[in-house]
Image (cartoon, helix red, strand yellow):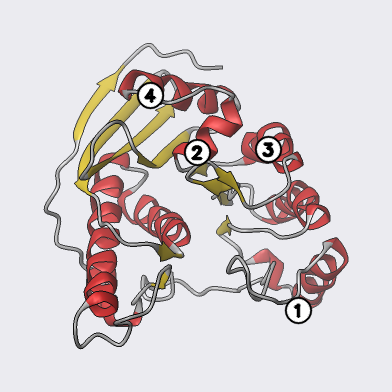
Amino acid sequence: KRIGGADVILVPSSPISQPGWKGQVLHQKELEELMGGLAAKSLDRDFTHLLTGYIGSSSFLNHIPELIRQLRQHNSNLVFVCDPVLGDNGRMCVPESYVDIYRDYIIPLADIVTPNQYEAELLTGKPILDADDAWTVIDNIHSMGCPSVFLSSAHLGYDDYLLGFASRVSGKKKTTATLKCPLVHTSFTGTGELYAALVLAWMSRTGDDVVATLEHTTATVQAVLNRTSQSATGKNGEGAGKKGPYHLKLIQSKSDIEEPNIIVKCKSSLDSDVDWQ
């Protein structure tokens, strides 16, 4: 986000969020204190975007709706991007109660949501076995009140590819986009966070163009993953001999974040006369 030209204030919900590592978890009390400090300096009036990711405390998570309401009192146009971190590959990394909190209280306040396949299935209670299922689940998330949905990755029977989906409803028009990108057969940490931050940046930069956003976001993620994989698994790589998940080479990928080389293009469509409420 900083590389993209944004001034960022970080609120560390969990200073060490890597599964299996130790570290403190912030709760509602600490969040209120941090926001109180910003309010004392009138800095809470300047927010244009809010991005949430991994949250390690249920009290912290439960306070997010109130935080959004407070920020929108100062800026009714605040864009809230929610990465509903619940888990991946069939395994949850947070308490099951988070599913209801996200579905019933947080996603209805979001402008953009970026779940992976497993998270989208948990939020809607519906399996994703093919592209039609993916669009059904995305429409379900739209019906929760969120106008823009990015399904970051879906394994739909391909051994070497992932599918990405995006959809935006504005008035009675719905724009959709999908693409197929090569699967990098290495384990990483932080991919979802990178994806959500890029979606925020490109939706802002392109005026909510989901097609351009999906293409640019995917191009950057692919470049970062490939660079990280090559560094980690190459004979002379610094990670040679180590087992993943590997931390992303973000600094080394600065140019790919700023101006990604778009290799994979989207298939897109525009439907009119849509009623999703």
Q: CA distance from mark 3 to mark 1?
A: 35 Å
Q: Dots 2 and 1: beta carbons under 8 Å?
A: no
Residue marked by disc 2 = 118
Tag 2 and tag 3, C-beta contact below 8 Å: no
Q: Residue at x 53, y 22 (%)?
A: 126
Q: Quadrant of residue 131?
A: top left
- Distance from disc 3 to disc 4, alpha carbons, whole Å, reads 21 Å
Residue type for callout 3: Val
Q: Earlier in the sequence, mark 2 or mark 3?
A: 3
Residue at the farthest left position: 263
Q: Looking at numbered disc 2 in the image, what kind of residue is underneath it?
A: Tyr
Local SS, label 3: helix
State the residue position of label 3. 99
Q: Earlier in the sequence, mark 1 or mark 4?
A: 1
Local packing at callout 2 (Cα closer than 10 Å; few below 14, some 14-19, many 20+) is many
The nearer-to-camera label among 1 and 4 is: 4
Upstream in sequence: badge 4 or badge 2 = 2
Q: Nearer the viewer, mark 3 or mark 1?
A: 3
Element under disc 2: helix
First in residue order: circle 2 vs circle 1: 1
Is 64 located above or below residue 107 in the figure? below
Q: Are marks 3 and 4 in contact (CB under 8 Å)?
A: no
Vertical placement of 41 versus 81: above or below? Answer: below
Quadrant of the image containing the C terminus: top right
Location of residue 198 in the rendering, given as x and y in whole percent from the top left corner: 38, 59
Q: Residue at x 22, y 57 (%)?
A: 219
- The tag earlier along the polypeptide, 3 or 1, is 1
Instruction: From the viewer's side, name the closer residue of 79 and 146.
Output: 146
Is residue 154 found left or right of 53 in the rendered image? left
Query: Callout 1: helix, strand or loop?
Result: loop
